[in-house]
């Protein structure tokens, strides 16, 4: 999608730094022949909107921003660039300028957004790891928001599976906080993923930026999966955007007594989302063939004792003492079997010496 008229990416960046709203910026770029003309037209039409933002000053600010981005390895992408995500370009109010650190896949790459509450349960964490891990192994880009809880779990699960994940943030890429999120962002970009923002370097996150950011999370993806959500929250805002953008929407059902599943169960009850009982439900809708290791391969050549232990462990966490009692063995002997099964990736240890089947 070529740049219109005589515009340059630098001049588009300059216009965006004048805090020009997305739709207005696109109209100015597509109907004006230069930054100078756009400033004149906008200043006249918007009653002095650019009175203190002359073209020379805007270009100076754009140069400073480009230098800052270069210092932090951030690329500047406009909606007219070929590598701009195809689906994002189609949404209402797409960001005309994106700031990206890392590597974007092809503009039409298959992607799924995985979102949920910051205060997730063990159930939500395990479900997220399962879905995100399978998506990654199936070659799907997993998109989330780098927040605590479900977002972080999703990103880490993809990295562990050797897949690609995008983190869409609500601040400048040089202003990620806290430190744990900044460190995870570095891992994402270092392992072939990308950090994406519509905010220039130097911009700190504000509460109002997060809901606005969510339209990008769902906008890049063909489908959105809500894992856990309370009755209100950012995940439901993302779900709303996905519906408005005519994207597939899935929700993981949860216990009717769980506050963290009120939102997801509500989406399913109101027929707003398709219940996702397994990653296959999402993959089939997207026409993707699952490519993962089977449990038979994971459990090949295990001993009868290890098989007995594996069969005693289910999807719900069990304490090691309970497993020992069910298997009729001592805790000391059981630890050997559990270690082998965990090494094979068939089970996982949780906090409090509890174990679940993966």
Image: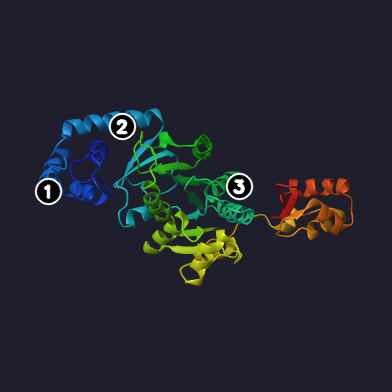
- Earlier residue among tags 2 and 1: 1
Is 8 positioned to the left or the right of 290 in the image?
left
Front disc: 3 or 1: 1
Q: Distance between the residues labelled 3 and 1?
A: 52 Å
Secondary-structure class at tag 2: helix
Within 10 Å of the Cα at label 1, are there few (<14), some (14-19), or many (20+) other Cα atoms?
few
Secondary-structure class at tag 3: loop
Residue 41: where, in percent of width, then height?
12, 45
Q: Is residue 309 visible?
A: yes
Tell me if residue 225 comes above or below residue 75 in the rendering: below
Q: Nearer the viewer, residue 161 or 154?
A: 154
Q: Circle 1 sits on which residue?
A: 45
Residue 145: where, in percent of width, then height?
47, 47
Q: Circle 2 sits on which residue?
A: 65
Q: Circle 3 sits on which residue?
A: 161
Q: Which of 65 and 227 is in front in this view?
A: 227
Is 50 positioned to the left or the right of 338 in the image?
left
- In the rendered image, the quadrant that contains the C terminus is bottom right
Residue 113: where, in percent of width, then height?
48, 54
């Amino acid at each position: 999608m070529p740049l219109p008229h005589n515009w340059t990416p630098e001049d588009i960046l300059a216009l965006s730094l004048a805090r020009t709203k997305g739709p207005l910026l696109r109209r100015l770029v597509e109907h004006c022949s230069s930054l100078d003309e756009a400033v004149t037209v906008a200043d006249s039409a918007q009653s002095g909107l650019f009175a203190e933002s002359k073209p020379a000053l805007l270009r100076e600010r754009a140069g400073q921003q480009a230098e800052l981005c270069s210092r932090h390895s951030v690329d500047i992408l406009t909606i007219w660039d070929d590598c701009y995500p195809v689906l994002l370009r189609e949404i209402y109010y797409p960001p005309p300028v994106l700031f990206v650190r890392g590597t974007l896949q092809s503009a039409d790459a298959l992607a799924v957004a995985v979102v949920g509450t910051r205060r997730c349960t063990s159930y939500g964490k395990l479900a997220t790891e399962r879905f995100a891990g399978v998506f990654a192994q199936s070659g799907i880009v997993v998109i989330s928001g780098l927040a605590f809880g479900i977002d972080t779990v999703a990103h880490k699960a993809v990295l562990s599976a050797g897949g690609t994940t995008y983190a869409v943030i609500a601040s400048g890429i040089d202003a990620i906080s806290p430190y744990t999120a900044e460190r995870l962002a570095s891992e994402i970009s270092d392992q072939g993923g990308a950090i994406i923002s519509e905010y220039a370097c130097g911009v700190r996150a504000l509460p109002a930026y997060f809901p606005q950011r969510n339209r990008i999370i769902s906008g890049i993806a063909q489908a959105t999966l809500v894992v856990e959500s309370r009755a209100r929250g950012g995940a439901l805002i993302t779900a709303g955007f996905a519906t408005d953008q005519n994207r597939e929407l899935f929700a993981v059902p949860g216990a009717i007594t769980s506050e963290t599943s009120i939102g997801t169960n509500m989406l399913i009850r109101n027929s707003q989302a398709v219940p996702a009982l397994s990653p296959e439900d999402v993959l089939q809708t997207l026409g993707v063939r699952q490519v993962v290791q089977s449990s038979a391969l994971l459990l090949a050549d295990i001993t009868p004792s290890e098989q007995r232990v594996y069969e005693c462990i289910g999807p719900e966490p069990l304490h090691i003492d309970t497993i020992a009692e069910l298997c009729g063995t001592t805790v000391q002997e059981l630890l050997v079997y559990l270690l082998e099964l965990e090494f094979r990736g068939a089970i996982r240890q949780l906090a409090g010496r509890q174990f679940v089947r993966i």
